Image (spheres, grey):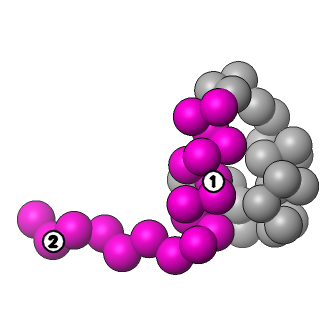
Amino acid sequence: MAAAKLDPIDLKILDAIQRDGRITKLALADKVGLSPTPCWMRL
């Protein structure tokens, strides 16, 4: 299986989830600078 390439936004998403695993979709999107749908699609 090939390794996934992560861009800076993906890394921000991972960091936010590691810090708070119960973060809401809306709060996560706001934290990384995306709207909720594109943020959720990256998960």
**In the image, residue 18 lies at what x, y percent?**
57, 34
> Who's the residue at 84% across and 66% down the image?
33
> Who's the residue at 15% across and 71% down the image?
2
Residue receiving disc 1: 13
Up-down relation of residue 25 to residue 5 (above or below): above
- Cα gap from disc 2 to disc 1, whole angstroms: 21 Å
Magenta highlight range: 1-19
Q: Which residue lies furthest to the left in this view?
A: 1
Inspect the magenta stretch and tell me whether residue 9 lies in it.
yes
Q: Which amino acid does label 2 sit on?
A: Ala
The quarter of the picture where residue 30 lies is bottom right
Q: Is residue 9 left or right of residue 34?
A: left
> Who's the residue at 67% across and 43% down the image?
16
Can residue 16 be seen by looking at this rendering?
yes
**In the image, residue 13 lies at what x, y percent?**
63, 53
Identify the main secondary structure in magenta: helix
| 2 vs 1, front mark | 1
| Numbered label attached to residue 22 | none
Q: How many marks?
A: 2
Q: Which amino acid does label 1 sit on?
A: Ile
**In the image, residue 26 lies at what x, y percent?**
87, 46
Residue receiving disc 2: 2
Q: Which residue lies furthest to the top in this view?
A: 22
